[in-house]
Amino acid sequence: MQRMVGTVSRGLRAPIIRQGDDIAAIVVDTVTQAAQSEGFALRDRDVVAITESVVARAQGNYASVDAIAQDVAAKYGDSTIGVIFPILSRNRFAICLRGIAKGAKKIVLMFSYPSDEVGNHFIDLDAMDAAGVNPWTDVLTEEAFRAKFGRPVHVFTGVDYIDYYSSLIRECGAEVEVIFANNPTEILRYTDCVLTCDIHTRARTKRLLKKAGARLVYGMDEIMTAPIDGSGYNERYGLLGSNKSTEDMVKLFPRDCKSLVVDIQKRLLEKTGKHVEVMVYGDGAFKDPVGKIWELADPVVSPGYTDGLEGTPNELKLKYLADNDFGDLQGADLQAAVAKAIQSKESNLTGNMASQGTTPRHLTDLIGSLCDLTSGSGDKGTPIILIQGYFDNYVNE
């Protein structure tokens, strides 16, 4: 009988992972024990994915507020720091901001508006239009913002992030001034020393600031790139991808992920005889229709993956084939024609009308988003994901 099931994504329960644990061994044991207990078999080209959080935890990749403060103070000295384009997140940014503030004398905090980079909105677009504000040109002080928009709170958390971030900075002993602007060079009216906190647009922001004459420009990816007093670090991403651990500590994005996934792939091959693909995943890349948040607060979806996950899908659109190329066929004849088209498809379908709408995103972004949705971010206890059938198509038995 023809196989009736395509892609299956399973969240696998694992032990609570602590610093120093052999994460590769835990992943291999969890996958093989799950297969045995649930009665399924591993296959070549299955995908095993591990959330970045437990990888970083096993590595002990943590940094304290004091370590962040020490790094910031070493880079900026007593200069007023323009902290620009922070995301609105207690989990992602608040503890980092405490460290930045502890290492500063004064901060000019410049928010983008009407939302932050990942879609957390201060204000509704209709409210902004009604107020006659042009976000591309208008620079607002905190007083002007309050006069026009009052005290808006986040739709999900109920937090007034203007007050929240300002209070954090003051509690850490620094002065704070708040402005709103979308042109990064506006901060240079206040200080020529800038820490840019945007994630995916950081390279452009740094370029524009330096071209405009900024004296000191660093990004979040350049803070905590080396250990301080034995702390964790991330040489590539710095504070980007970090999460709150405690009120005084952040968990950084994991390091050395490529070597880890290759090790897991090798161990699974030795134990099962199957060549599986392995990746570490963080935030997925998808947009929430209510809060308008598009989720990806990590610098990448996957900081490490095996070579078989490189590239983009190369797929034909079945409904296009059925409605156009084979619109005159039905039943077995239609199935046979579609199967033949799939079997004979070109290795690169870019520009082919029959592939339109197949979302040629990177495989790691697509699969990582599926993993993030499967594992969730709460108490499911499934930091390891097994995906089967992802690379199958209509003709695979």
Image (tube, helix red, strand yellow):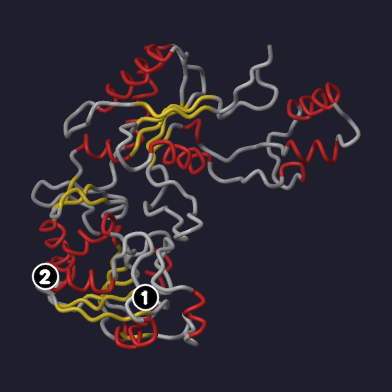
**Residue picked out by circle 1:** 209
At 74% across and 25% down in the image, what residue appears? 343
Q: Is residue 253 above or below residue 4?
A: below
**Residue 379 x/y as whole percent:** 30, 38
The nearer-to-camera label among 2 and 1 is 2
* Rendering quarter of residue 218: bottom left
**Residue 64 x/y as whole percent:** 13, 53
Q: Which mark is residue 171?
A: 2
At 48% across and 59% down in the image, what residue appears? 290
> Residue type at mark 1?
Leu
Residue sitting nearer the eye, 255 or 376: 376
Real-space CA distance between mark 2 and mark 1, rounded to the nearest whole angstrom: 29 Å
> Residue type at mark 2?
Glu
Q: Secondary structure at mark 2?
A: helix
Residue sitting nearer the eye, 129 or 228: 129
Q: Quadrant of the N terminus?
A: top right
**Residue 152 x/y as whole percent:** 35, 74
Q: Which mark is residue 220?
A: none
Residue sitting nearer the eye, 103 or 75: 103
Q: Secondary structure at mark 1?
A: helix
Q: Is residue 379 found left or right of 78 in the rendered image?
A: right
Q: Is residue 206 above or below residue 381?
A: below
Q: Quadrant of the C terminus?
A: top right
